Amino acid sequence: MKLLCFFILPLAITSCCLGNRKCQADNYNTRFRIIDNTTGKDLVFGPNKIYDQNAIRFYSLNGTDTIYHHYGSGANPNPGQDSLLYVSMDYRKAETVFVQLSNTDRDTMAVTYPLTDASPCCADYNTAKPVTVNNIPLEQITGGVFLIKK
């Protein structure tokens, strides 16, 4: 009976964790489109653009330090849609991120970092989840893309 309790029972419980499993790591990458609030037209890419993709900045403040989040633009994996802004939020998990679209247009984004329970076999992990811009809830569309409406 002791053999059952100390060897076979724990093996049976953890057997789901054996084999070829893929665990997630913390993921602070996010994707955005900046669109016109009334027409839905893209304001960074295409014929209706009013913002220069190279001038856009995502940053947060840590005391007196400014932390710039890695940012880039690229193709949207969904066919027929404009390109996306790809942002890697900093590992320090700033809850307030500033979005500077131009010298005169700056917005405030609230970001949360929910913990995903990956038990019993993997470690729990965090993801970055933008929630609001200027206290207006962000819409999330197909592919995990967040819409910033101006």
Image (cartoon, rainbow, N blue to C red):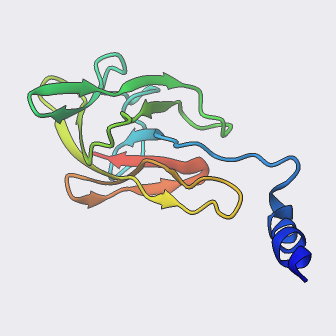
Identify which residue is drawn at 40% across, 24% down. 71
Q: In this picture, is 16 found above or below 92?
A: below
Is 76 displayed left or right of 19 in the figure?
left
Q: Position of residue 125 (x, y in %)?
A: 53, 51
What residue occupies the far left of the structure in this picture? 64
Front one among 2 and 138: 2
Q: In which quadrant of the rendered view does residue 135 lie?
A: bottom left
Q: Quadrant of the C terminus?
A: top left
What residue occupies the far top of the structure in this picture? 54
Count the marks: 0
Q: Position of residue 45 (x, y in %)?
A: 44, 27
Q: In this picture, is 93 found above or below 52?
A: below
Q: In which quadrant of the rendered view does residue 54 lie?
A: top left
Identify which residue is drawn at 44% across, 39% down. 33
Is 64 displayed left or right of 149 in the figure?
left
Identify which residue is drawn at 85% across, 74% down. 9
Q: In this picture, is 36 found above or below 116?
A: above
Q: Quadrant of the N terminus?
A: bottom right
Q: In this picture, is 14 found above or below 28?
A: below
